[in-house]
């Protein structure tokens, strides 16, 4: 009787828990590593170790000690280069280390895709405040300032006035692992996300959403609705650009979550990640829209199997909506169970409870909660979302 394969999951937070559960359900032994000592994924794993998932050599050492058969990092950018590095060093399936760098270093991503003819905003790499000032002068206002190597909108700022730059630069620098930042020209259009996967170089687009944002923090999305509300020609152009980006950056077999901006009919790259998205997008929305178990297929590929799946191309709709509640100390929350019973509601997650202090979200990770709704049409999922928002009420002091 052969021993079960061991899969190494990078990250033990709530968005990695679905992958850990999936691996266990498929009969794998699961090793989890994370920088924090207390993570929900540890309780589900067979083994765990405290290790920064950005530490490639440290992760390689632990992976070799446990004789892993595959390594996965599917909902966080920080560990994607580590995943690829360890896989290459141990002779395991993966996306390739250089490919991982193409997807996780935003300056490198911009340079490579621009040379290939992908529409990009103008951009400048900056390492000092005075360089950022010169970049603003060259590119004009408004502009976007961001770290080259982070995610979840951390450290991202829209600069509309030069007086904002110094504080924005200091904040962005906190989230830049290398210290390098990008200043980019501002794209004024409709932001979209694209969920896709590749099998042996063939690209399959699973879903395209349009996004809305919190009024007080326009860098942070409060809604992703699939399918996006565009005419067929624009949707076709989004798919075309996304396929060009994936091929240009070197993706052969893997999963991707991308963001684009549609501006007067053209589709510009915002950024793309060689992993699935959190907030139940990869674990729940992608399989639903695809009509195929993409997370399972990718996990099986990473452990030596085949990723021989295709979407079924049936029309489906989904909405990922983030709550907005009044600021203050939470006294009580009502209407949650009633909302969960509404047709099409798959998930309602609140990241707080009575006694907690609510503040406006500063980035994607500080949003107070979310709802995931499935349905046949866009109008249907948006209507149910309105009912959910009316039902769930937070009372603050």
Image: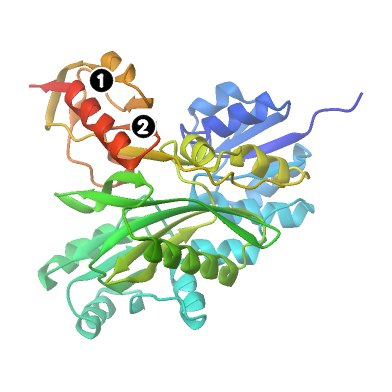
Judged from the image, the secondary structure of the residue bearing numbered disc 2 is: strand
Residue 353 bears which disc, if any?
1
The residue lying toward the viewer, choosing from 395 and 201, is 201
Q: Which residue is mark 2?
A: 373
Q: Residue at x 27, y 25 (%)?
A: 352
Q: Residue at x 20, y 83 (%)?
A: 137
Can you give x and y, in whole percent of width and height, for residue 299 in the image? 67, 41
The residue lying toward the viewer, choosing from 265 and 339, is 265
- Type of colouring: rainbow
Is residue 179 in view from this perspective?
no
Figure check: 265 above or below 344: below
Q: Are marks 2 and 1 in contact (CB under 8 Å)?
A: no
Can you give x and y, in whole percent of width and height, for residue 160 in the image? 14, 68
Residue 46 horizontal side relative to residue 371, left or right: right
Q: CA distance from mark 2 to mark 1?
A: 22 Å
Task: Identify the mark nearer the N-term, 2 or 1.
Answer: 1
Q: Residue at x 69, y 52 (%)?
A: 86
Q: Residue at x 54, y 55 (%)?
A: 274
Can you give x and y, in whole percent of width and height, for residue 42 in the image? 56, 26
- Which quadrant does the N terminus fall into? top right
- Which quadrant does the C terminus fall into? top left
């Amino acid at each position: 009787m052969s021993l079960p394969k061991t899969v190494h999951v990078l990250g033990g937070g709530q968005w990695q828990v679905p992958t850990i559960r999936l691996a266990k359900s498929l009969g794998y032994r699961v090793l989890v590593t994370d920088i924090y000592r207390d993570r929900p994924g540890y309780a589900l794993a067979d083994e765990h170790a405290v290790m920064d998932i950005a530490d490639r050599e440290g992760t390689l050492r632990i992976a070799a000690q446990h004789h892993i058969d595959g390594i996965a990092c599917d909902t966080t950018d920080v560990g994607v280069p580590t995943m690829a590095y360890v896989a290459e060093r141990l002779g395991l399936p993966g996306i390739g280390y250089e490919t991982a760098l193409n997807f996780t270093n935003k300056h490198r991503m911009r340079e490579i895709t621009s040379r290939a003819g992908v529409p990009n905003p103008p951009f400048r790499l900056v390492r000092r405040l005075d360089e950022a000032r010169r970049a603003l002068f060259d590119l004009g206002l408004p502009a976007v300032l961001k770290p080259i190597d982070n995610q979840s909108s951390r450290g991202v700022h829209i600069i509309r006035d030069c007086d904002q730059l110094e504080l924005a630069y200091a904040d962005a620098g906190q989230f830049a692992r290398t210290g390098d930042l990008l200043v980019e020209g501002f794209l004024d259009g409709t932001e979209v996300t694209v969920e896709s996967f590749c099998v042996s170089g063939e690209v399959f687009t699973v879903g395209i959403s349009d996004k809305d944002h919190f009024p007080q923090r326009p860098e942070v999305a409060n809604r992703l609705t699939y399918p996006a509300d565009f005419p067929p020609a624009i949707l076709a152009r989004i798919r075309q650009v996304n396929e060009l980006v994936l091929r240009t950056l070197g993706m052969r077999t893997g999963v991707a979550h991308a963001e684009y901006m549609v501006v007067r009919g053209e589709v510009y790259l915002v950024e793309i990640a060689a992993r699935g998205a959190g907030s139940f997008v990869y674990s729940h929305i992608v399989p639903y829209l695809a009509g195929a178990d993409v997370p399972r297929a990718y996990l099986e590929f990473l452990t030596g199997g085949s990723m021989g799946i295709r979407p079924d191309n049936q029309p489906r709709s989904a909405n990922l909506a983030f709550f907005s509640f009044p600021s203050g100390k939470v006294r009580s929350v009502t209407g949650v169970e009633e909302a969960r019973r509404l047709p099409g509601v798959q998930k309602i997650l609140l990241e707080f409870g009575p006694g907690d202090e609510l503040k406006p979200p500063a980035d994607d990770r500080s949003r107070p909660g979310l709802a995931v709704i499935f349905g046949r049409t866009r109008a249907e999922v948006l209507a149910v979302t309105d009912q959910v928002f009316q039902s769930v009420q937070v009372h603050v002091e």
